[in-house]
Image (spheres, rainbow, N blue to C red):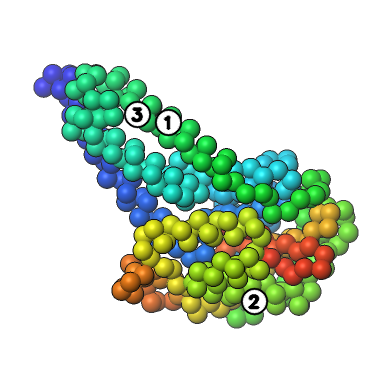
C-alpha cells in the first residue's frame, strides 16, 4: 500500500472513531441528570477558585467549577460567561449544535464530501487538518458570542475579595446523623457561627431543591437558589425538554454531613457543607414514562454544596461541587 493510501485509511479510521464517540459522550453526560447535572457549578464569593477544606464526609478533593460567573481574583463582582468545554453542558443548545456540526463535518470528510470537499477536494492530510481547525475555530467563535449574549448578571455584588482560607470546623457525623454545629472564620477574622437552625435549613434545601427540580418548578427554584444557579438549572431543564425527557429525583435523605468552612464577605454569609445523601435518580420519557436513564434503585451521592445568605434573607444554594 502506498504511503498516501495508508495515510488516507488512517485518517478515515480516526474520523469514524471521533464521529461515533461524540454522540456517545453526549449521551453519557445526560445520564448524570440530577440537579446540577453532575458537574460543578456556581460561585463561592472570593473563594470560588480556592478548594474548600476536605472533611470526613468528603475526604478527597473537589472538582473545579465547570460553570461559574466569577473570575479569578474578582470575587463575585464581575459577571463572566459560564465556563465549559467545547461540548460541555454549559454550552446548552449551542454546545449540542457544535457537537453535531463537527460530527457531521467529520463524517462528510470520511465519505469525501467534508465541509469544503473533504480529502478528495484538498487531496492531502494537510487539507484535512486545515478543515478541522477551521470547523473548531468557527464553533468556538459562535459559542463565545452566544455565551456573551446570554450571560446574566452575577448573583451577588459587593463581595470582599480579601478572603483567605477558612478554618475547617468538623462536627458530629455518621450514618443518619445529619448535620451538626460548628464555627468557621471569615475574611474579616470574625467568627461566623453556624447554628443548628442553619444546618436544618441546609438539609431542608437539599430536599426542596431536588423536589422543585423534579417538578420543573423554576419559580420555586428562584426562592431556593441564587440567580446564577437557577440560570444553570433552566438550561439543564431546557435540554431535558429538547430530548423529550424529565428527570425525577425522589427519596432524598441526608446520610452524613460536615461543615468545610463558613465565612462572611461584606454583608453576605457563606457556608460550604459536604453532604452524602441517598436518592433515587431516573430520567423518563415525557410522554410514555418509560425510564431512559438511571433506575428505580436507590443510590448515594457525595457533593459539596455552598449556601449564601444576605441580611434578612434565608439561605440559598450558591454552588454545587463534585467530589473526586
- Tag 2, which secondary structure? helix
Q: Which residue is mark 2?
A: 204
Q: Position of residue 118 (x, y in %)?
A: 24, 26
Q: Tell me how far mark 2 sits from mark 1, CA to CA.
A: 45 Å
Dot 3 crowding, Cα within 10 Å, few <14, some 14–19, many 20+: some
Q: Position of residue 24 (x, y in %)?
A: 32, 51
Residue 296 visible in the snapshot: yes
Residue positioned 65% across, 68% down in the render: 224
> In this view of the protein, which residue sits in the foreground, 82 or 201?
82
- Tag 3, which secondary structure? helix
Image check: 151 left or right of 282?
right
- Foreground mark, 1 or 3, reads 1
Residue positioned 23% across, 34% down in the render: 108
Q: Tell me how far mark 1 sits from mark 3, CA to CA.
A: 10 Å
* Displayed quadrant of residue 240: bottom left
- Foreground mark, 2 or 1, reads 1
Image check: 322 left or right of 44?
left
Residue positioned 59% across, 46% down in the render: 151
Q: Position of residue 313 (x, y in %)?
A: 77, 68
Which disc number belongs to residue 254?
Answer: none
Q: Tell me how far mark 3 sits from mark 2, CA to CA.
A: 49 Å
Q: Which residue is mark 1?
A: 138
Tags 3 and 2 touching, CB below 8 Å: no
Residue 257 visible in the snapshot: no
Residue positioned 43% across, 29% down in the render: 137
Q: Quick one: which residue is furthest to the left in this view? A: 1
Tags 2 and 1 touching, CB below 8 Å: no
Tags 1 and 3 touching, CB below 8 Å: no
Which disc number belongs to residue 132?
Answer: 3
Dot 1 crowding, Cα within 10 Å, few <14, some 14–19, many 20+: few
Amino acid at each position: 500500500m502506498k504511503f498516501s493510501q495508508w495515510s488516507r485509511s488512517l485518517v478515515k479510521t480516526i474520523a469514524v472513531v471521533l464521529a461515533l464517540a461524540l454522540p456517545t459522550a453526549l449521551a453519557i453526560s445526560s445520564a448524570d441528570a440530577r440537579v446540577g447535572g453532575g458537574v460543578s457549578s456556581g460561585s463561592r464569593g472570593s473563594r470560588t477558585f480556592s478548594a474548600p477544606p476536605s472533611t470526613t464526609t468528603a475526604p478527597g478533593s473537589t472538582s473545579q467549577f465547570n460553570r461559574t460567573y466569577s473570575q479569578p481574583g474578582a470575587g463575585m463582582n464581575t459577571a463572566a460567561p459560564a465556563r465549559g468545554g467545547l461540548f460541555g453542558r454549559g454550552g446548552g443548545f449551542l454546545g449540542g449544535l457544535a457537537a453535531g456540526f463537527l460530527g457531521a463535518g467529520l463524517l462528510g470528510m470520511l465519505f469525501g464530501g467534508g465541509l469544503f470537499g473533504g480529502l478528495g477536494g484538498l487531496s492531502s492530510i494537510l487539507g484535512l487538518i486545515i478543515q478541522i481547525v477551521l470547523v473548531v475555530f468557527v464553533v468556538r467563535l459562535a459559542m463565545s458570542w452566544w455565551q456573551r449574549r446570554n450571560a446574566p448578571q452575577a448573583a451577588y455584588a459587593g463581595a470582599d475579595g480579601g478572603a483567605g482560607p477558612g478554618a475547617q470546623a468538623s462536627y458530629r457525623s455518621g450514618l443518619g446523623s445529619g448535620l451538626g454545629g460548628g464555627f468557621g472564620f471569615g475574611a474579616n477574622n470574625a467568627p461566623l457561627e453556624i447554628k443548628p437552625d442553619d444546618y436544618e435549613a441546609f438539609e431542608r434545601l437539599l430536599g426542596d431543591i431536588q423536589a422543585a427540580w423534579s417538578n420543573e418548578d423554576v419559580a420555586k427554584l428562584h426562592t431556593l437558589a441564587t440567580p446564577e444557579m437557577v440560570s444553570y438549572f433552566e438550561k439543564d431543564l431546557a435540554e431535558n425538554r429538547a430530548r423529550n425527557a424529565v428527570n425525577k429525583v425522589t427519596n432524598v435523605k441526608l446520610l452524613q454531613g460536615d461543615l468545610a468552612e463558613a465565612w462572611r464577605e461584606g454583608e453576605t454569609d457563606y457556608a460550604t457543607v459536604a453532604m452524602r445523601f441517598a436518592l433515587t435518580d431516573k430520567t423518563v420519557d415525557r410522554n410514555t414514562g418509560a425510564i431512559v436513564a438511571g433506575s428505580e434503585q436507590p443510590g448515594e451521592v457525595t457533593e459539596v454544596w455552598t449556601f449564601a445568605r444576605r441580611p434578612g434573607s434565608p439561605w440559598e444554594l450558591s454552588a454545587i461541587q463534585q467530589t473526586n
